[in-house]
Image (cartoon, helix red, strand yellow):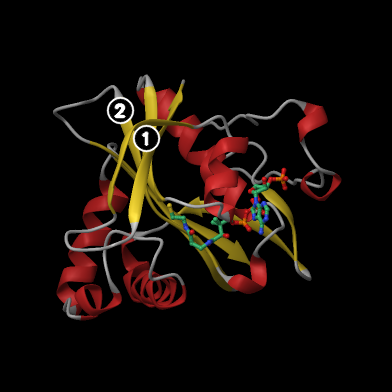
Amino acid sequence: MIRVGDERTPPERSARHSGVHRRPGDVGSRNFFPLGRHVAHVRRLTAQEWPRYRDLRLRALADAPDAFGSTLARERDRTDSDWQLRLSAGASSAAELPLVLVDGAEFVGLAWGRIDGATPDVAHVFQMWVAPEGRGQGGGRSLLDTLISWARETGAAFVELDVTCGDTAARRLYERAGFRPVGVPRPLRPGSALMARRMRRVL
Ligand SMILES: CC(C)(COP(=O)(O)OP(=O)(O)OC[C@H]1O[C@@H](n2cnc3c(N)ncnc32)[C@H](O)[C@@H]1OP(=O)(O)O)[C@@H](O)C(=O)NCCC(=O)NCCS
């Protein structure tokens, strides 16, 4: 079972993050919060939601092509069966946590956690994205906090991710959540001029 704590001490939390509601069965103990006109929350994706996951992931890649190791061209080439298999494997695995940020009836954010069998002490974060209309309201932090708490519950010692170098919202989000750079910058993807930096949070 996933139980999620709030990683921030009260003085660090802004007022906009404080109106959090709880509902049984959701990941996170503080994963409901006002976002736009609705109450948003974070939960695990189900296998049946693969078409919405596919659409959101493609939207993320189109919106923020410099933020991810993969590309829109590559992901767009995947078949429905690929998407279905990917999500059904992730949704049913204890070593993966595919998350969605839900605002009313809309899916407005994604993140995916994974622990590889070879390095069970490290939880990896991928696919972090919040739709432009939902940004700046705590959605990214809620996705990240949920992944951090899940990683801790699995017994991992670290959470790691790669972020494109620069003074970006993503970089600040991770720094605020206690991630620190490790290692040297490397190309975001083979042949790319963009550099990415690994960041790590000790649990
Ligand atoms: C990075 C991203 C996920 C943040 O989502 P978000 O919902 O806007 O983030 P939050 O509202 O939860 O903000 C969390 C923290 O991030 C920082 N932050 C987020 N957006 C910021 C901005 N535009 N300017 C400054 N700081 C920002 C703040 O420190 C904030 O903490 P605070 O509110 O306590 O000060 C979102 O901007 C995004 O999807 N960007 C494009 C994709 C991307 O870069 N993904 C990361 C891949 S590694």
| Left or right: residue 22 compared with residue 153 | right
Residue where numbered disc 1 is placed: 160
The residue positioned 38% from the left and 24% from the top of the image is: 158
- Few, some or many residues within 10 Å of mark 1 (<14, 14–19, 20+): many
Going by the numbered disc 1, the residue's amino acid type is Glu
Task: Provide residue 163's location: percent of width, then percent of height.
Answer: 41, 49
Q: Nearer the viewer, residue 155 or 188?
A: 188
Q: CA distance from mark 1 to mark 2?
A: 7 Å
Task: Provide residue 162's location: percent of width, then percent of height.
Answer: 36, 45
Task: Provide residue 142's location: percent of width, then percent of height.
Answer: 60, 46
For mark 2, give the secondary structure: strand
The residue positioned 29% from the left and 37% from the top of the image is: 94
The residue positioned 60% from the left and 71% from the top of the image is: 132
Give the total number of marks visible in the rendering. Answer: 2
For mark 1, give the secondary structure: strand
Going by the numbered disc 2, the residue's amino acid type is Val
| Left or right: residue 35 compared with residue 51 | right
C-beta proximity under 8 Å, tags 1 and 2: yes
User: Residue 160 occupies which quadrant of the picture?
Assistant: top left
Task: Provide residue 170's location: percent of width, then percent of height.
Answer: 53, 52
Earlier residue among tags 1 and 2: 2
| Left or right: residue 126 compared with residue 203 | left
Residue where numbered disc 2 is placed: 122
Residue 30 to residue 155: above or below? below
Residue 19 to residue 66: above or below? above
Q: Nearer the viewer, residue 78 or 191?
A: 191
